[in-house]
Every structure is written in C-alpha cells, then in structure tokens.
Image: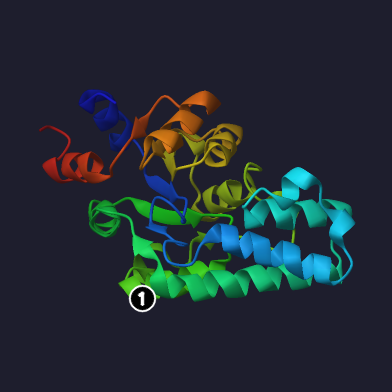
C-alpha cells in the first residue's frame, strides 16, 4: 500500500490490537498445524466419533475448524473441553519452535514507546500467548491485555468478542484502535467491531485471501510500519 495511506492509518490509533499467530510469530513454524489438526481428528476417530466431522472438516488441516465443528454439535461438553485442552497443549509445545515475525518485536516495543497501548486478540490460548511473550521479553508490552480462546468457542474470530473485550477493558472507542491481522477472520472480526484493519500478508496466497475478503490496507512486511513509526508523524 502507499506510504502516505499507511502513515495515516498508523498515526491514528491509541490502541493497537494484534492477532498473535501470524503478525507476532509463526506459531507452528516447527510444529505443523496440519499435523495437529490430523491428531485431533484421529483422537476423535479413536473414540468412535468419526461421524462428528464432515469430510471437508476432517481434511481442513486447521485445528480451529475441527474444534469449532465439535463445539457446534456438542456445545459446552466435556468432549469439547478435552479437545480444547489437547489443542492448547499442542500450541504450548509449538512455542519452543515458533518463529518470530520479522520486525514484530521492535515494532511492538516502538509502538509502546510512542504512547500507544497494545492488546492481543487471538483464537489461540492465552496461556500460549503468555508463554511466547515471556520468551521474547514482551509480556510487559501487553499485559494484562491478552484476550484469547475461552471455553465459549462460539466467540472465536470472526466473532468480534475478543476485540470487544479488549476495547472495553482499555476504554477505547473502536475508531481509536487498529487491528493487525493476517486472515479473513481477523478482518471480519475487526469490521464487526468497527475497528480499522491493517493486513499482514507474508506471501501472495495470504494477500489474495485478505483481498478477496475485502481488505484494502495490506503490507507484505512489518518493516515499513516500523520505519514510519520511528520517523515520526512529520517525516
């Protein structure tokens, strides 16, 4: 996107809401998410629950799709609780090999240094987010504003629940915030909450998905955001 448009977008927010897996790190860089999804499917099938999932859900390679599908059919059940805990444990294991997104750490610290308040709004477990942030020395940049997956799985993005929780806790109007995300569900959640959106697309496939969903402000790297923030509003 054009630098002036990007400058205008990042100059406004008093509160910056970050998705976690993507803009901050690649959580499953060394611990493949598709294998995690397969493991969840196999765990269900080992308990005679093959019929809980449709063929497309079984082949989705997305653990959150598997989790949400089971929750839709057995909301609030012990089965869902156990499946969610299995996913959380896989996410926790993945933090040890997660790959930091280029320029994310300095951008987070710089945004905090210039006076913006930061929060995380994610479909990942908040336990996982805290573990990763502690490993990078970033906890103080966000705490206590980490809003992740709860037992109410119908509140996962694209539902705006975690964004609304962050805005309410931080006393921010949606128009005074900015959401940084890398998936259509991030965009849809931001739109539903009334929060401006900046898409991060590390490859052409991610960019196409965001554009097809209606995103207009997209960057392939966080570097220009960091450079603009460091240059100040008048540069």
> In which quadrant is the C terminus drawn?
top left
Residue 18 is at least partly visible in this image: yes
Q: Give coordinates of residue 194: x percent, y percent.
A: 55, 33
User: Looking at the rendering, which quadrant does residue 34 occupy?
Assistant: bottom right
Q: Give coordinates of residue 169: x percent, y percent.
A: 54, 55
User: How many numbered discs?
Assistant: 1
| Residue 93 versus residue 1 in the image, above or below | below
Q: What's the coloring here?
A: rainbow
In the picture, measured across the screen, residue 180 lies left or right of residue 108, that is right
**Of residues 144 and 30, the one drawn nearer to the viewer in this rendering:** 30
Residue 214 is at least partly visible in this image: no
Disc 1, SS: helix
> In which quadrant is the N terminus drawn?
top left
Q: Which residue is mark 1?
A: 135
Q: Give coordinates of residue 91: x percent, y percent.
A: 55, 69
User: Looking at the rendering, which quadrant does residue 139 occupy?
Assistant: bottom left
**Of residues 150 and 52, the one drawn nearer to the viewer in this rendering:** 52
- Residue at x-position 35% and y-position 43%: 202
In the picture, measured across the screen, residue 177 lies left or right of residue 108, that is right
| Residue 198 versus residue 104 in the image, above or below | above
């Amino acid at each position: 996107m054009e630098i002036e448009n990007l400058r205008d977008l990042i100059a406004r927010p008093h509160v910056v809401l970050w998705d976690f897996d993507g803009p901050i790190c690649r959580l499953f860089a060394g611990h493949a998410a598709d294998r995690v999804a397969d493991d969840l499917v196999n765990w269900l099938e080992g308990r005679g629950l093959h019929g809980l999932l449709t063929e497309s859900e079984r082949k989705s390679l997305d653990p959150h799709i598997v989790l949400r599908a089971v929750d839709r059919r057995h909301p609030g059940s012990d089965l869902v609780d156990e499946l969610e805990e299995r996913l959380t444990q896989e996410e926790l294991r993945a933090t040890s090999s997660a790959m930091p997104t280029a320029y994310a750490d300095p951008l987070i610290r710089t945004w905090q240094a210039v006076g913006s308040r930061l929060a995380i709004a994610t479909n990942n477990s908040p336990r996982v987010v805290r573990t990763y942030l502690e490993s990078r020395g970033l906890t103080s940049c966000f705490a206590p504003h980490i809003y992740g997956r709860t037992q109410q799985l119908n509140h996962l993005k694209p539902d705006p629940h975690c964004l609304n929780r962050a805005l309410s806790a931080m006393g921010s109007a949606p128009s005074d915030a900015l959401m940084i995300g890398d998936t259509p569900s991030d965009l849809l959640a931001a739109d539903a909450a009334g929060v401006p959106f900046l898409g991060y697309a590390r490859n052409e496939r991610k960019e196409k998905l965001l554009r097809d969903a209606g995103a207009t402000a997209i960057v392939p790297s966080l570097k220009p955001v960091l450079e603009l923030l460091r240059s100040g509003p008048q540069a």
